[in-house]
Amino acid sequence: MDEESRKTHQELWEQYMEVERRELEQRRNGQLGRALGRALPGESQEELQRIAEDDQRKAERGLVELRSGNEVWFKHIDEITRDDRQARIESENARAAWIQERLRRQPRLQ
């Protein structure tokens, strides 16, 4: 890899990590709790609150979720490497799918 390509790769990595840090800050500020809103039929408001608070505590500690299939683990943001990108993407996709499914199940206002 030539110097220019190496520089471009480094710039892209820095941009990626900046997005990760912004998302971590949003989680610290309670983003998941706001996204979850009120419990749906069959859900517990207390359980949703526990999930949101747990996410916020992990974010305050700088932890991000990684996922591969059903395996989930956490890593400090400063320890994330390029090799972790796929596991981060899989984790974010799983979270987004869960939230989208909850939105789909919300009763429609008449």
Image (cartoon, grey):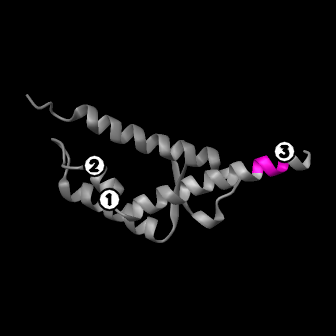
| Closest to the observer, 75 or 24 | 24
Q: Secondary structure at mark 1?
A: helix
In the rendered image, the residue lying farthest to the right is 2
* Residue 55, image x, y percentages: 39, 61
Q: Which residue is drawn at the image coordinates 72% and 52% (left, top)?
A: 11
Label 1 is placed on what type of residue?
A: Ala
Kind of residue at disc 3:
Ser
Element under disc 3: helix
The reply to whether discs 2 and 3 touch (Cβ–Cβ < 8 Å) is: no
Asked if the residue at tag 1 contacts the one at tag 2, i.e. Cβ–Cβ closer than 8 Å, the answer is yes
Label for residue 5?
3
Query: Quick one: label 1 or label 3, which is nearer the N terminus?
Result: 3
In the picture, the disc for residue 36 is 2
Q: Is residue 103 visible?
A: yes
Residue that appears at 23% across and 50% down: 37
State which quadrant residue 100 falls in.
top left
Magenta stretch bounds: 5-9
**Residue 26, percent from left and from top:** 41, 58
Sequence-wise, which precedes: disc 2 or disc 3? 3
Task: Give the mark toward the camera: 1 or 3.
Answer: 3
Q: Residue at x 58, y 63 (%)?
A: 77
* Residue that badge 1 annotates: 52
